[in-house]
Amino acid sequence: MMTTFLVGAGLIAVPIIIHIFNRTRYKRIEWAAMEFLLNAYRKTRRRLRFENLLLLLLRVFAMLFIAFAFFPDGVSNAAKWLLDEAGISFTGGAGATKPQHLVLVLDDTASMRYRELQLTNFDNGIKTANDLLSRLNDRRDRVTLIRVSTVQVAAGDEKKADDETLQRLNRDVPVIDVKKARELLGHALPGYGTGSLLPALREAGRRIASMDDEKEVPRLSIISDMQANAWAFGNPGSAEHQTFVNIMEEIGAKLQKHNIPVMWHVVGQNSTRNRGITGLSLEDPVVGVGIPNSLNVQVGNFGSGGAESSEFKLTYRIDNEEERPFSQSVSVEPGMVRTIRQDIPAFQTAGCHSIQIKITDQDRLEDDNTRTIAFDVVEAVEILIVNGAPDEDFSKDEVAMFKLLLDISSWYNPEEGRKKTINRVSVVTERQLSTTDLSVYDVIAICNVGSVTEEFAKSLYDYLDNRGGSLVFTLGANVNADDYNTHFWREGKGLMPARLDTPEGDDADVGNPKLHTIKGVDLTPGTPFAMFDENDLQRGLLENPTAMRRWYGVSTPAELGLADVVQSRTLLSIVTEGAPELVVDKPFGRGYVALFTSTVNNAWNHLWENRGLSLWMFSELIRYCSSRTAVGRNLMVGEHFTRVLSEREQTGRGNAIENPQSTTDKLVEATLPDGRRRLHYTRTATPGLYRLKYLATDDTGNEIVARTELFSVAIDGRESDVGRLGGTPGPGGAANPPTVLKNALPNLSMVFDQRSEEDAGITGKASTAGSSDIWVLFIGLAMLFLVSEMGASLYFGRRAE
């Protein structure tokens, strides 16, 4: 741009060259008749020189202002060069002659990929950032570039400021010169992740607070699309709102010493529209060979100030097959999220599979129009029940009703002429357990087992560490609490999620026992009993039965002061004094352990009576345990993939990851204290399907892929909601972030700058306040000088005549 400006400015040389050419001296010849004219010329020479010089200056200034009008960036760069040479920053405010330190907060979350015409909001943000850098002195001023993705920390650690965190921030967010900042912006790309802007503002405040007022002038510029999710703390009702206010007031007090406001650069239009896939799951997370299943797809219609058409089409692709249309068209009202159910054909082969969902209609944020899920298809779910109280009488047997429950299926197989279930249930007694290979089972249920030997306990620990399966304990009259605590609790270091105390409640065999109901404590998505919180009817299936007669009291890690050591949670409790725990769980090793503090025995809990405990609870718990093979299989952008290898999986030549770009990445490997290898992969910044390859060697010594596992990475559904801070979804609900911020920070000196591609036209050049006025000014001055030159020429010519 500077070169083009110099070419344009070179036009001013044209009148100068003409002027010099007209002064070219010719060969002088003495001629007596001309002496009279020469004497007259000598008398008027000074006046003629003045007139010619005046005309020359008018022509030069006319050409110069034409160049200024058509190449304003060149004017800015030329002025900046002159100021740099003079040691002055091209910024206003007090202290402009001191070194400037610009703290630049740049939003690079997924919503910044929202596209207006040709450019994304992030593109406009980069243009804004470069404009800010152009106002600094390259030789003297400094920049701290804070990208939102760089300062994001794990949930719960936002307020920690330990030495390790500060060292990481100082390393990842260094203070750089203007030239280096310009280079970094030239290579910057928007991410696919989500996150709050609050950590970035907190880091900006820390940097500004550490500056020496005598040595440099602090400045803060924030570039963002002001998406409501990322700026939720800006709303007065947010739990983090006061923290946000405190941070900004501290920053404002520092800047006020130099009479400098906080600069907010809002990129993109206030009116936003987007449709996106926000969630994808299987109706039954355990997928069996030959058993049909269904997809549940969450689709949202988001925006502010109006929304796109609410009708659009979806397709799905299984593995590498052709795309198939959904059986129904999708209609979602503006501002709403709807779950669409789609039946899919049964899988005929076991192994890793994937399904990709796609919105066929394009919109302004295309990255959330596609979503992928990865899962295993199994021949059967192998379930082992260890029966601690067998009996030939069905009604007295400890696990007879439990096994019957697991054999129930709602899917009828017409070829076999019977109902088919994915569960393959085996029942053994305590004595048979020592000769049973536990490694082949996905779920093991220990039901009212009394005697616990060291060998028995070791087999369960080995099962969780190597097989990584699920273990469910149900108690009963045979259980010895001391033995269980000795072998399974181990003062919080064992596999059991809570310590057993004494039996409580009323014995079912004595008189008229008092009954108790059940209450859901943790029914959040992803927990074993989440389905009971979907509506009142399903919650009633869990809580309405008057079920509990007798149970074991337990002490949870939180009650024992071990909450920081043992990661257990209470899922269900009993509605009575003290709200004793009914179901407690925790991860252990590679596996999962759930403790049901009562029994599955029919006589004890009256499972089949109208007032009995709902069998749905056991069904959901076992289904959750069966589906744990998919845990860590479907991640959000930025979540790390971790895989602990069993002894069988550690053979071969190693492992590699193939990312969605079809390039190969290496994993970080570590050896655990027990000798097993743990694979760790952190480069999950791009949504799509990833392949974990198990490498081996064939007979000829060549490297081959022996086996492949799949896992998917998706954009957080919150990024699909592109509505802005202070906006109301739906028609007429255009957002107004400045109003919200001014109300939240009434005492803070602020300046708002709106940047959008639509304001600048199809060229994609970000609009600059007052640029059109400057163009008109320069054109007006050029015309003024041209008219003046014409008038002066006419006047001088007539007088000469």
Image (tube, grey):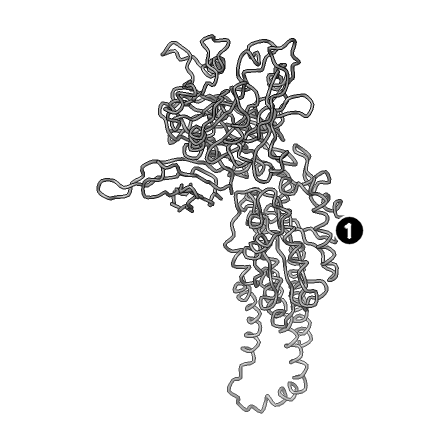
Residue 721, above or below 201: above
176 left or right of 684?
A: right
- The C terminus: image quadrant: bottom right
Q: The residue under label 1 is which amino acid type?
A: Asn
Asked which secondary structure carries label 1, the reply is loop
Residue 593, above or below 183: above
In terms of image quadrants, where is residue 157? Answer: top right
Estimate the x, y position of residue 317 in percent, counting from the top left: 42, 29
432 left or right of 749?
A: left
Q: Using a 10 Å C-alpha cutoff, classify the residue at mark 1 as few (fewer than 14 neighbours), some (14 to 19) or many (20 or more).
A: few
Residue at image coords 72%, 58%:
254
Residue at image coords 56%, 62%:
176
Q: Which residue is mark 1?
A: 747
Residue at image coords 72%, 54%:
250
In front: 87, or 155?
A: 155
Estimate the x, y position of residue 724 in percent, counting from the top left: 65, 40
Residue 425 visible at all: no
In front: 158, or 360?
A: 158
In front: 173, or 565?
A: 565
In front: 347, or 167?
A: 167
In terms of image quadrants, where is residue 477? Answer: top right
